[in-house]
Image (cartoon, grey):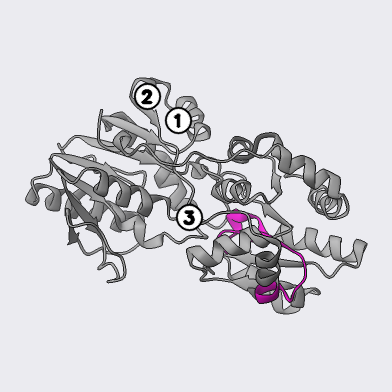
Amino acid sequence: MRIGVNASCVLQDTPADTGNIIRDLLSGLCRSYPEHHFIFFFDQAPPATLQWPQNVTIVVVPGNGQRNWQQYLWLEWKLVSAIKKQQVDLFLGMDGQIPLRSKVPAHLLISDMGFLRGVAGIPVARQRWQKKNLGRYIGQAKKVIVLSHTLEQEVLHYAPAAAAKLRVLLPAIDSSYQPLQWEEREEVKSTYAGSVEYFVAVGSIHPKNNLMPLLKAFSALKRRLHSNMKLLLVGSETAAGAEITGSLPSYKYRNDVVLIPDADQATLAGIVAGAYALVYTARFAGVATPVYAAMQCEVPVIALEGAAAREAGGEAVLYTDPENLEDLADKMCLLYKDEELRSRLLSKAKKAGGTAAFDALIID
């Protein structure tokens, strides 16, 4: 079977920003089904460092830009033409979209539905366009795949008729996330935090990740406890997050905030495992990957109340009221001072499953 894949979203994959979920799913899928041939469609040439199995062919369909009409032109005309030329038997929409003009059976993968609620830092017109078309994509898709039970419930609420073709595929968490021995943890602290304890937040520097409230809560902790704790922000800098990075030079505790924008997987795993606690401040993510990673590293988590965080952490997470900045500061201070609370949280931690069921992507 010849399987076409819209793989452009892989170009935005990084360990910290997305957990490399789509890249790892596609890589595992191709290796698990060597009898099939996969055609990966990109809107620009992928870097040479992005390696795929031998049963993958790369086809570049040059993009026109990021405006809605330009995206429409690429998806519904250029991509459809390329799909016909490649004689594709099945199409995988890995970015939450499928070409509606195509007659080829399509499976739709949904990894995020935050745009239904209005996410900060993403153009309103873009979110309106996504809302407008999501129902059409779900309706036309032969199968709809989601990456969490949180997303499953959101799809069922948004499109109840999709229940019969909906499948949950829980992505595996990278095996590099493991607890550290005392000596290893001290080495990580020495390398990234000046040999002191630190909180870590994982994700792009973007308003959707609520980093400004986190910085304010960290300020409150520093004022109250006079602690030498640091805050590590691990994730790429974005244009939408320019206000956040621009505010850091005047931030009172700027010397205690460390930006790590380009961590590879091994570095990220070490930083998470070496943390005193992970703080997860995204509210509307479809999959709380950093929470799973922290659980696997036996690192406690403080998270804004949200369905994805609840699914990932259950009772092992210290939740905060997303509407109350003081509550986040209070919980950070509480966890810092109360070692017994930290131990109780860790005793309730659950670890993610080991492998993803790749067959869900291509088998009905």
Name the residue at 41% across, 35% down: 169
Q: Which mark is first along the chain, 3 or 2?
A: 3
Quick one: SS at disc 3? Answer: loop
In-image side of 361 versus 351 (left or right): left
Q: Where, quadrant-wise, is the N terminus in this rendering?
A: top left
| Image: 218 above or below 90 | below
Check disc 1 and report the residue beneath it: 155
Label 1 Cα neighbours within 10 Å, binned few <14 / some 14-19 / many ≥20? many
Label 3 Cα neighbours within 10 Å, binned few <14 / some 14-19 / many ≥20? many
In-image side of 284 versus 193 (left or right): left
Instruction: From the top left corner, tell me how far across and down residue 313 is, in percent.
Output: 64, 39
Asked if the magenta segment contains residue 67, the reply would be no
Q: Say what amino acid the circle numbered 1 marks.
A: Val
Label pair 1/2, CB-CB below 8 angstroms: yes
Q: Say what amino acid the circle numbered 3 marks.
A: Thr
Alpha carbon separation for disc pair 3 and 1: 21 Å
Instruction: From the top left corner, tell me how far across and down residue 201 is, in percent.
Output: 65, 59
Check disc 3 and report the residue beneath it: 18
279 vs 128, nearest the viewer:
279
Q: Say what amino acid the circle numbered 2 marks.
A: Ala
Identify the image quadrant of residue 165: top left
Check disc 2 and report the residue beneath it: 162
Label pair 3/1, CB-CB below 8 angstroms: no
Quick one: SS at disc 2? Answer: helix
| Image: 232 above or below 30 | below
Q: Where, quadrant-wise, is the C terminus in this rendering?
A: top left
- Magenta residues? 190-211
Q: Nearer the viewer, mark 3 or mark 1?
A: 3
Alpha carbon separation for disc pair 2 and 3: 26 Å
**Residue 86 badge:** none
